Amino acid sequence: MYSRQPTGPPTFSFGMGGSGPPPRDILILLGIVFVTFSMRFFPGAALIPRLLELSPAVYRPGLIWQLVTYPFIGTGLPGLWFLLELLILFWFARDTFRALGQRRFWKMTLTVAAGAALAAVLTQIAMDLVAQGPPSASAFTLMQGQRMLLVIFIAAFATLFQHVSIMLFFVLPVQAKWFLWIEILFGFMGFLRTGDLAGFVGICTAVALTWSSLQPGGLRQILYRWRLRLRKVRYEGELNRMKKKRGFHVVKDPADVHKGPWVN
């Protein structure tokens, strides 16, 4: 499914040729998604996934555990597409797990899933207040269950192995880094189809949080750099206003002045 240039170790195999046994955590994850998906079609067990999936009940009756449990509840219709989703989920989750390790993998997954759910829920609450009516039946559809796991692990793979070539639709070779934007594009297409704005916001948030959590220094370092940039822009703006009001002449930093050969 993808290939990596041999000059950049480690080399990963995407598809059937992975080295070593699959991580046990990933097999357990797939098993949970499959079991909860199957429970939806048995009348006596269907209530369990409904209580664990993300729904307006998270802020109306207050079932707040849904903010964390929803990615692990399989959703969709039975058929080949669901099995293909699980296969793609296995490929991306396996390589992401091996790259990050168990602790960092689960920390990223739970943090991003909760952050995306919170953003989606706040969006849906705002929409409910504006519409003054019951929430749409399609709320959170786009980010439900294994779909959110796919968003997180594909975004993580695209961040960790951005120069790897992935065969989009098994035909078109695309560098992994572009899948960050492709995920958002697919999410937008889903929003146009379903009208699920909250789900689309959740997808965008998940992509952004995944990318930022895997940057050097993490989200804290990114926010710190942006704070420094904003502070610089503010100071430069204040300085320009002072120059215009009072006719100040700003002396350049000596380090920025070109020194001739006669200057010691």
Image (cartoon, rainbow, N blue to C red):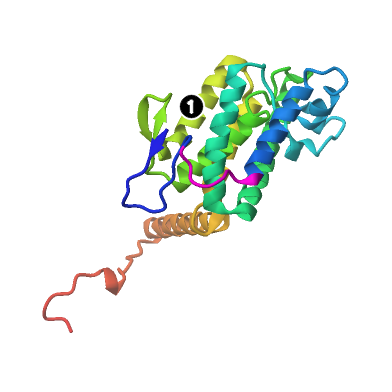
Where is the C terminus found, in terms of image quarters? bottom left
Q: Quadrant of residue 81?
A: top right
- As drawn, the residue found furthest toward the left would be 261
Q: Nearer the viewer, residue 25 or 148?
A: 25
Q: Main secondary structure of the magenta part?
A: loop
**Residue under numbered circle 1:** 185
Q: From the viewer's perspective, is residue 136 above or below residue 246?
A: above
Secondary structure of the residue carrying numbered label 1: helix
Q: Position of residue 145 (x, y in %)?
A: 68, 30
Q: Position of residue 23 (x, y in %)?
A: 60, 46
Which residue is at 63% across, 52% downward? 102
Q: Is residue 252 magenta?
A: no
Q: From the viewer's perspective, is residue 115 above or below residue 190?
A: below
Q: Position of residue 230 (x, y in %)?
A: 49, 54
Q: Quadrant of residue 151?
A: top right
Where is the N terminus found, in terms of image quarters? top left
Amino acid on which disc 1 is placed: Leu
Q: Is residue 23 magenta?
A: yes
Q: Nearer the viewer, residue 239 or 242?
A: 239
- As drawn, the residue found furthest toward the bottom would be 264
Pointer 1 local density, CA inside 10 Å: few below 14, some 14–19, many at least 20: some
Q: Nearer the viewer, residue 86 or 59?
A: 86
Which residue is at 56% across, 30% downward? 87
> In the image, 11: left or right of 191?
left
